[in-house]
Image (cartoon, grey):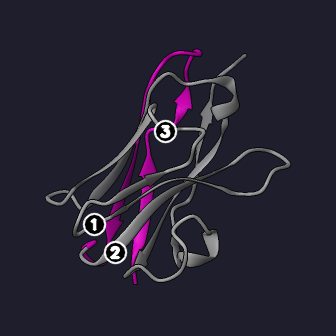
Amino acid sequence: QVQLVESGGGSVQAGGSLRLSCAASGRTFNNYRLAWFRQAPGKEREFVASVMWNDGITYYSDSVKGRFTISGDSAKNTVFLLMNSLKPEDTAVYYCAARSYAIGDYHLPTSYNYWGQGNQVTVPS
């Protein structure tokens, strides 16, 4: 069993930066695919970024490409999402997700079986 604990959300002005963290307990991330999703009020949960822990291959949604960076720290068993140049449309609850091995499409929430508790990110307009 993997437990994911998120931290780092908050409110920041447009153009600012935040870094989200997602730490795992219970086991290491070896052979896991990690991802960040977000969900705004009244909208479906959408893919933000993913990384394969072992080889570092990353994917990003078009809406965040060039502004967000997903990375990991194996010593801390933690995955990060660095968000730069934040926009009001980035406002959402952000969730980290994990799945052992690359099963399913990386951008679908149903491809992940472990989820963090969610962290609010607010960028006022």
Left or right, 76 with reference to 106: left
Q: Are marks 1 and 3 in contact (CB under 8 Å)?
A: no
**Amino acid type of disc 1?**
Trp
Q: Is residue 66 magenta?
A: no
> What is the span of residues highlighted in magenta in the rendered image?
1-29
Q: For mark 2, what is the residue?
A: 32
Rendered-image quadrant of the N terminus: bottom left
**Vertical relation: 48 (above or below) 4:** above
* Residue sitting at x 34%, y 75%: 32
Please tell me which residue is depicted at 28% across the width and 66% down the height of the picture.
53
Give the residue type that dot 2 points to: Tyr
- Residue that mark 3 sits on: 65
Is label 3 in a helix, a strand or a loop? loop
User: Is the Cβ of the residue at disc 2 closer than 8 Å to that at disc 1?
Assistant: yes
Sequence-first disc among 3 and 2: 2
Query: Residue 10's spot in the image, x, y percent?
Result: 54, 31
- Mark 2 crowd level (few <14, some 14–19, many ≥20, 10 Å Cα): some
**Residue at image mark 1:** 53
Q: Earlier in the sequence, mark 1 or mark 3?
A: 1
Judging depth in this view, the residue of 67 and 15 nearest the camera is: 67
Image coordinates of residue 33 in percent, x first then y, are 38, 70
**Does the magenta portion include 2?**
yes
Q: Within the image, what quadrant is residue 89 found in?
A: top right
The outermost residue toward the front is: 62
Q: Which dot marks residue 9?
A: none
Q: Amino acid at mark 3?
A: Lys
